[in-house]
Image (tube, rainbow, N blue to C red):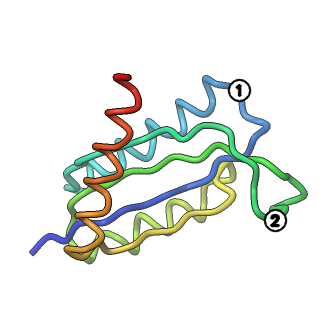
Amino acid sequence: MTNRYETVFILTPVLSEDQTKETVKKFMAFLKNGGAKITHEENWGLKKLAYPIQKKSTGFYYLVEYEAEPEFIGPLETEFIREERIMRFLTVKMDKDHLAFAEGRRDKSKKTANA
């Protein structure tokens, strides 16, 4: 039985654009190879952090929503911990209210992009 998950991860700001894309591709490939079905992804870009992490005050944020088996989350998070380019990550299981909120957020961002 698969569940819907949302993972946000923060990449260190000292990376070049190519290094950032390479790291994101690595994790997308890890998800796909692990049997996860990616439903949505967003690059939030460089953002100011609420508090310094590893003496850095900014980071590249990336969000990915996917369907996966619950057993897959452990190995995925282990991979995030091993990657030195990742400063922080958070994985959340999405319930029906969370799914509705995420859909609304996407619809809102599409309207502002088209305006």
Residue under the image location 42 percent in, 41 percent down:
42
Amino acid of disc 2? Tyr
Residue 43 in the image: state x and y as whole percent: 49, 38
Q: Is residue 64 above or below residue 115?
A: below
Question: Disc 1 or 2, which lies upstream in sequence?
Answer: 1
Q: Quadrant of the N terminus?
A: bottom left
Q: Is residue 48 above or below residue 114?
A: below
Judge the density around disc 1: few (<14), some (14-19), many (≥20) Cα neighbours within 10 Å: few
Location of mark 1 (residue): 16
Amino acid of disc 1? Ser
In screen coordinates, is 105 left or right of 36? Answer: right
Residue under the image location 81 percent in, 62 percent down:
53
Residue 23 in the image: state x and y as whole percent: 54, 39
Q: Quadrant of the C terminus?
A: top left
Label 1, label 2: how far apart the Cα atoms are: 22 Å
Number of marks: 2
Image quadrant in which you'd find residue 112: top left
Dot 2 lies on which element? strand
Judge the density around disc 2: few (<14), some (14-19), many (≥20) Cα neighbours within 10 Å: few
In screen coordinates, is 96 left or right of 72? Answer: left
Residue 103 in the image: state x and y as whole percent: 25, 53
Residue 51 in the image: state x and y as whole percent: 81, 65
**Of the numbered discs in the image, which one, if any, rests on residue 46?**
none
In screen coordinates, is 78 left or right of 110? Answer: right
Q: Is residue 50 above or below residue 45?
A: below
Image quadrant in which you'd find residue 52: bottom right
Location of mark 2 (residue): 51
Q: Which residue sits furthest right?
A: 55
Residue under the image location 14 percent in, 70 percent down:
2
Residue under the image location 30 percent in, 70 percent down:
98
